[in-house]
Image: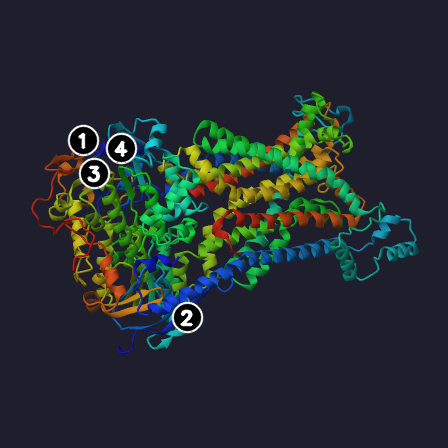
Amino acid sequence: MSDIPTFEVDSVTKVYQSRGRRGQAVEALRDISFTVAPGQSLGVVGESGSGKSTLSRLLLALERPTSGSVRYRGEVISGRRERDLRDFRRHVQIVFQDPMSSLDPRMRVHDLLAEPLRALHIDVDEGERVRELLASVEMPAAAARRYAYQFSGGQRQRIAIARALGPSPEVLIADEPVSALDVSVRAQILNLLTGLVRDFNLTMVFVSHDMAVVRHLCDSVVVLYRGRLVETGATEEVFEQPREDYTRELLAAAPRLRAQRGLTPSN
Amino acid sequence: MLPSGARPGEIEVDDGFGDVEHHGRWLHNPSVVIGGGIVALVVLSGIVSIFWTPYDPLAVNPSHALAAPSMSHWLGTDEYGRDEFSRLMASSQIALFVGALSVLIATAVGIPAGLLAAAREGAISQVILRLTDILYGFPALLAAVVLAAAFGASKMTVVLAIGIAYIPVFIRVTRSNALVVLNSEYVLAARAYGRRTFAILRRHVVPNIATTIIAQMSLLFSLAILAEAALDFLGLGTVAPTASWGTMLASSQDYLGSDALLTVWPSLAIVACVLGFSLLGDGISELREARRRS
Amino acid sequence: MTALLSVRGLSVSSGPLELVRDVSFDVDAGERVGLIGESGSGKSLTALAVMGLLGEGLRASGSVRLGDEELLEASELRRCQLRGDAIAMVFQEPMSALNPTRRVGDQVGETLRIHRHLSRKAAERAAVDLLSRVEFAEPERYARMYPHELSGGQRQRAMIASAIACDPGVILADEPTTALDVTVQRRVLELLDRLVDEEGCALLLIAHDLAVVSEVCDRVITMYGGRLVESGSVSQIINEPHHPYTQALLATSKALSVSESSLGSQLPSIPGTVPSAGHFPRGCPFQDRCDRRVEACQVMPEVVETDNRALACWNPVVGTSASGGGEAA
Amino acid sequence: MSADESQLSPHHLPSGGAVRGQRGSRTLGTSLRRAGLALLPLLRRLATMVVALFGASVLVFVVLNVLPGSPAEVILGTQATPRAVQQLTAQLGLNKPLINQYLDWMGNLVRGNFGVSYISHQSIGSQIGQALTVTGPLVLFALLIGLLIGLPLGLAGALRNGRVSGSLIGAMSQVGMAVPSVVAGLLLIVVLTVKLHIFPTSGFPGWSDPWQALRALVLPSFSLGVVEGAIMSRYVRASILEQLRSDYLRTARSKGLRVGQALRRHGFRNAAIPLVTVVGLELASLVVGAIVVENVFSLPGLGLLLLDSVNNRDLITVQDIAMLVATTVLVLNLLVDLSYRLLDPRLKGTA
């Protein structure tokens, strides 16, 4: 059972045919292959235009690949009809970058957290489950009565994480979950994620442009550049001995704390 | 709202947009207060006029024709001795009826079509948009003339004309606002936990575009009243002797030199009523903007 | 020696809300100062107040001196003469900061047309030179393009080109690389670094990332909740932070590093949330989130200047330990 | 666009060669495509307008021809014998199937032949042409007045935003928008004609005496234009305010431009983009508004002709004028779209 990979991405290419302009096709991903093992924390690293957001949508079966396939626990999910995906939807949840735009401003926190349970027909006591979820992200139960805009960025991201945990997923896809947060709040959310992954035994796909965060959170990594997979491997290996120039450049470009000013990376 | 200086761990409500204050904001917006007040007054006079007016708005009294404002006839009488005030009151019925029914037609067709065009990209959306292109060629007045030519002038041709003419407006407003919601991350999140299109429209799109639509309805209500007045004036809508602001204006034309007040009263009524609805609509949009910025 | 830019007791308020309170600092000629802080810290407002470009409803008080001139009291005409000529600014969002309907060269050369009264032709030629100085390979071609035809990094470089056009004494850069990718960020920082060197002008670099500031600047000012909480040389701050906020930020920053593995460990973090601008507690703005809070924190601590550094804290961190700091959540 | 990253580091990809090759061909492809792109969306937009016009014509024709009862009956009156009616029906071509009647009408219309009224027996084309000599100037004057009022008022409103004078301007335009042109017209007549005898009440003397003709058009143009000005001032105000709050205006000021200079150099052109739409759409609404105002002032324009035709059940004339107005509105929409593309470099080549 456990040797079936959680995700198998097999030579996936995604081309967007933009409307309006004829013949303007944008190749978001090209021939990407990798697997995610159960319990693994995979970091997907790339800059803007690398296709990392497209990749997370493909993993969620929200888009279908132009060619190639995505399998979840051995079953092809790409291109399946929505009604055949109900089990999959329970098992794979997502947390987005901007906790303001990922929470419906017209819903109270209670409804935000109960919505996935209702949509997936999960038979639980809503009130109790919402309290549980809020507790697991270290938010007081009273939060349930309020709207998302009444909270600060970090708190909203906690709510978004609680929503993702609602259906007791096996996989959490996190799309830049701390990029929009204040520096002094990032560490809290990263610690929360680390704890949740451990406590709930989650498999995680962590999409980010921030190499330092990926190094802290992920045991393996996929580096994307302009829709292509540049390098993949165990985090330690890739960070310590990057094989590709682009990976090296990404690592070198990350700003470092220095006691004396100087921009040239010290090797 | 929690007292300021909440300790860590406590929930901090962002900056005082607590529920109470949020609802209170409606009464702090001058556009909403003034517009709402005028609208309420018009609606009230329309309702009251069904049961009571100082005089029968249709009762002819030649001996009192063209009387100046007095204690018995507050705003004077028209060329047939009918009480101006009573006729103004009765006219608000027509204005409200035409406004409400035409906005109802426009929304009943426009909103579902707009939602459909937003949710179903491709052929369906294209067909709907091309149909709105056609309707765009027929502003309310032109539509009313064509309908009146075909079916004869009546209140209903006016309602139909205005209603149809505003369908494309609602389609566009609904569609563009719905597209913003449909492209949002919270809808993506809803799709990720298995919500289908229809449920997303009902649970996310409609609640989020409701304020905009209501503001638009209020604005179009004001435009409908303008159009109705113009059409009645042209003799393409309500027909004499039924009182309406437009017909009152039309018959006052003959007395511009002698009894200009006959023109002034319905003019004021129209301007006030239109102003009321447009202010209300503006106020609602302003509140929405303010909330979005917060 | 008098500072080139001297800010004293600067406050920015929006109606009853004080968004920046009593901020004082100096920037000497040729010096590079980093201003760090997160949302609501007032760092951008401080820069805009210095430029005299605060938005509707915002008011600045206190003193901002450029050389011998008091800017807050200068006429708008005089300030216009100084803006772009003696003091220039680079903004965060290079897309919206450039006019979408005018060509890049036109916008880069505009500063020269305003202050040096160059003709359109001459300004165009100067713009091409400026673009090549900010490392455009084909400056003539890019000068003719519109902003939307450029990438984010190119747009920001064009912004920098227009900022250096009149050799200003001070450049204010408000999060110039926040909207950019890491590799592009590095390049823009290097460019800024080189140009500031060549021009010998002073730089006030506003950022939320301590690491970025430490790479480019000589001195660091930390703001929190509209207040200056600590300032000092980069080495003083990095090696020996005194304010609990600076210290906690550093601890997180050190733990999260590309070059060292910290897989699965707890990061040192600061509890609580950042209040929105103008809603920080009375007294020390950081007290609610601080693990070194004492009774006195309910009163705003004075900024005390010693040994070329400044600090506003009743219970500062002493000693070199950069661990601990905030509690691990 | 991609050149930046290639300057940054030429070694980004393991398969850099392939990428570079692709880029080379892209440049050639781009230049080829650009030529086509400039035309293609234009043609597509033109096609959708033709489709919309076709739809509009069908709509007008069907609505005006579905009702039973032949125009021949109307013309001949209630006393007419069935035989006479039949004869006239055949004579008018009304016994043909509807589809043929439609094709006849459209075919003539496309060739510029508006047909002959079966009421007045006059050429509809020449009647419309005559009417346009009144309606055309009326609409243009009204637009001019609207702009002359709306632009400065809106600009002042934006620049004085937040002050009492700004709010006053806002309130004025809000009230102005609520005034129907009928009301404006009647009140102008009351004050300027009846009380002060400055302008002629109504009617139109014809262009043989241009001075009198212009005098006759002054009040109608103002009735339309003043209200239009109020509407436009709101759009102008909103558009200028948006510019004043834009980041690039702040950039311009950071270079040393004063607010007014920055607005002139950077704001006006961008503010004009949404305003072009407004002018286009308002021009369309003025054409329709003219129908009403011509009736207030008894001007022999398109509106009066249309209304007379409705009252006489002169359906072909109604059809023709309705199509003319609908076409005008749709063409204005098209022009607005196209001008957008001229003004905004970001939209070049998009559909």
Cα gap from disc 3 to disc 2, whole angstroms: 51 Å
Amino acid type indicated by mark 1: Thr
Query: Decide: marks 2, 1 in contact (CB < 8 A)?
Result: no
Left/right of residue C142 with respect to residue D200 in the rendered view: left
Same chain, labels 3 and 2: no
The x and y percentages for residue D311 are 79, 43
From this viewpoint, is residue D107 visible? yes
Instruction: Check disc 2 and give the amino acid type.
Output: Pro
Between the residue at mark 2 and the residue at mark 1, the CA separation in whole angstroms equals 64 Å
- Please name the residue that numbered disc 1 is placed on: C2
Identify residue for label 4.
C11
Whether residue A107 sits left or right of residue C274 in the image: it is right
Are discs 1 and 4 located on one and the same chain? yes
Residue located beneath label 3 in the image? C228
To which quarter of the image does residue D138 belong?
A: top right
For the residues bearing labels 4 and 3, Cβ distance under 8 angstroms = no
Q: Which of C134 and C188 is in front in this view?
A: C134
Depth check: D37 or B41 in front? Answer: D37
Residue C223 lies, with reference to residue D52, above or below; the image says: above
Residue at x-position 39% and y-position 74%: A68
Q: Who comes first in sequence, dot 1 or dot 4? A: 1
In this view, which residue lies farthest toward the left? C319
The residue where tag 2 is placed is A65
